[in-house]
Image: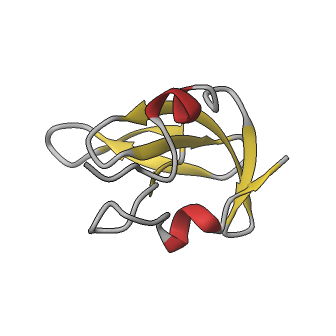
Amino acid sequence: MELLPISLAQLQGMIGLSLRWRDLDYEIVEVLEDGPSLVAQSIAANTAIQSDVHGRARREVQQVVIIPVLNSDKTQLHPEFLEIELL
């Protein structure tokens, strides 16, 4: 069994941290174990329009992104994860 370059405990310890990714500021709000991936919510003023089940615009919500942690082989850190700058 190969050792992963980062543990789930380390990732879960990142919840609540602020980061900059692709020139936007986010806060880590969740860790998805399958992948694993970080779920980050925008802390800037940029919002997305959320639609209801019928496709009608309902409300503005903070943008949420999912950042993969490991590559497809699960042997190295994903290039998108390496773009993260902790604030």
Residue at the left extreme of this rendering: 54
Q: Residue at x 71, y 40 (%)?
A: 43
Image coordinates for residue 5, horizontal then vertical, percent: 50, 53
Task: Name the residue furthest front.
Answer: 1
Q: Position of residue 77 (x, y in %)?
A: 49, 63
Name above or below for residue 86 compared with residue 58: below
- Counting from the top left corner in percent of width and height, residue 87 is at 85, 46
Left or right: 34 in relation to 43: left
Q: Residue at x 61, y 28 (%)?
A: 15
Question: Eyeballing the image, is 35 above or below 43?
Answer: below
- Where is residue 79? Give x, y as percent: 52, 73
Which of the two residues, 52 or 8, is positioned nearer the viewer here? 8
- Is 84 displayed left or right of 67 in the figure? right
| Residue 44 seen in this snapshot | no
Q: Is residue 40 left or right of residue 22?
A: left
Q: Is 80 above or below relative to 64?
A: below
Residue 84: in sight, yes or no? yes
Who is closer to the viewer here, 67 or 48? 67
Which residue corresponds to the image point at 37% horizontal and 64% vertical from the top-left?
Answer: 75
Task: Count numbered badges in the picture.
Answer: 0
